Image: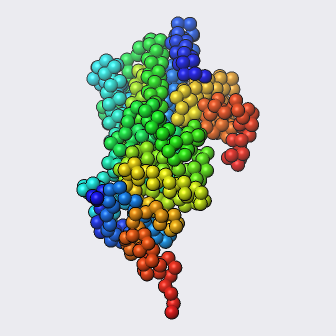
Amino acid sequence: MSTTTRIAIAILVVVVLAAVPWFGSDVVVQFGISTLILAVLAQGWNIIGGYTGYASFGNSTFFGLGAYGVAIAMVQWNLPFWVGMIFGAVMAVAFAILLGIPVLRLKGHYFAIATLALAQVVAAIVSNIPLFGQNIGLVLPPLNNDAMFYELALALLVAATLTVAWLTKSRFGFGLIAIRENEEGAAVMGVNTTLYKVLAFALSGLFSALAGGIQAYWITFLDPASAFDISLNVKMIIMAVFGGPGTIFGPVVGAFVLSAVSEVLSSEITNVAGLFFGIVVVAAVVLMPRGLADIIRHFRTSGWRYFVQNIKAHRI
Amino acid sequence: MSAILEIDHVTRRFAGLIAVNDVSFTLNEGEILGVIGPNGAGKTTLVSLISGTLAPSSGDIMFEGHSIKALPAFRRARLGIGRTFQIMRPFPGLSVLDNVAVGALFGKGEGTADLKEAREKARRHLEFVGLGRFADQRADELGGPGRKRLELAKALAMEPKLLLCDEVMAGLNHVEIDEVIDVIRKVRDAGITILVIEHVIKAIKSLSDRLLVIHHGEKIADGEPDAVLSDKTVVEAYLGKRRA
């Protein structure tokens, strides 16, 4: 497919998605909002996890800080929603820079564990601060306008995806990929690895925080448990990896496919949905460890053997 | 001839082990300096100290008259110090071309921000080392000799003033070694100063203007290749003391 056709298809998809609130039912729109927010989170994780190669468990913390930014601004200070979005984004970016500098020195599992621990610490701190509503949480003024939330989430997803597309064509993005592929090799070739990693972490945090802000205003309730839910971080990783980490559209497609699968499962076979969702994820890891994007790239040449090759490659 | 690199009483310890012990030497502009020594002599550590992936425990390193001891690796790269790795480290998931393009995007003086220009430069460097027709392959699909050349192309794309080659000939056959020697000579003719580490003595003898021998982390000889290789201490380091 040429670049022009791909861009045309992407624009068409965005236009169709943008029209959903006008012809879709309430249920569809609500499903759309939560899926779009998850897609933004998966795309945000893609920047630090997919492109830079640092498997972050801190992105749900950024999400939480973004959500609290909106909640605090609107509930405690009576400020408009957009001020809250900025406040939340600033908190998340500041957090990413301050903690990224020490934590991004760690590699592999150590980085994952450190960010996981940070997420727990932040949740514990927040639940003791009155401004954040402690353990009781904050109730936001309701706004009954799902179409607005839907379009906002879609706009954010477009912005996140354009940012990732820019990464693949920019010096900054090449620096991140070089860090992922071989950090020492990148440094001796002139890549300022510390700066680039922190910037990627902050950029990833920015999108996660904005998604959190939309979610908080949409759900109208926020407490530490829901804001800093680590399973949300697991979800975004699964979606990004399922779709194809380090690709432009992979995480978005992953989020849509898995959200749809999970929605169908939970309405069809309610109580064992989790089990089936687990099976889907395990099958994906075994059969297509590099995600949907890789299948599209290689299925034409390898055909069904693609799956067999993956099974063999991993000696399962 | 002016000195481009001065190593001044540099020592590097790893816990109890002294990998480089009080080594001093100068490298003049436009020179090819060969560094030889038995396995584990501290040659690669020396390269890492110059390129900045390791910091010296004591001593100073001067590049173009300024101390670079405290600078991180990426800053030294931007000053114009390029290196290859003995254990080849391409960016495996990237194409051969893009591996080299990273050098042009960053490299000396921060390189260029234009990806298209960087790829054009990269293609020229790939042709130069003889990898032109592999440009679109993934780097991890290259074989050993190809990876050695890729290491060279990556470092050259940074347009360095000083090129540190860490065993670019190890594992190559005679024909390939001759080709690499040829490439290195051409690099020098383009005005780049070169430090070559090797333990294939025959290869390095014909290439170097000057030879430096390291043994147990210490410099034991420095001078004309023929004179150095007939030096008694050097012969002993390689072949052991004659028991008479």
Residue B112 seen in the figure: yes
Rendered image coloring scheme: rainbow
Which of the two residues, A275 or A171, is positioned nearer the viewer here? A171
**Residue B131 is drawn in which quadrant?**
top right
Q: Where's the N terminus of chain B, which quadrant?
A: bottom left
Q: Position of residue A142 (x, y in %)?
A: 41, 16
Q: Position of residue A236 (x, y in %)?
A: 52, 33
Above or below, A21 against A134 in this view is: above
Above or below, A291 against B142 in this view is: above
**Residue A223 is drawn in which quadrant?**
top left
Residue B86 seen in the figure: no
Task: Tell me if B118 is positioned left or right of A269 in this view.
Answer: left
Residue visible at 41% across and 67% down in the picture: B211
Q: Position of residue A79 (x, y in %)?
A: 29, 20
Q: How many marks?
A: 0
Residue visible at 59% across and 40% down in the picture: B133
Q: Position of residue B53 (x, y in %)?
A: 39, 56
Residue visible at 58% across and 53% down in the picture: B145
Above or below, B33 against B189 in this view is: below
Residue visible at 45% across and 74% down in the picture: B229
Residue at the extreme bottom of the image, as rendered = B244
Task: Tell me if B67 is positioned left or right of B228 in this view.
Answer: left
**Residue B210 is drawn in which quadrant?**
bottom left
Which of the two residues, B80 or A118, is positioned nearer the viewer here? B80
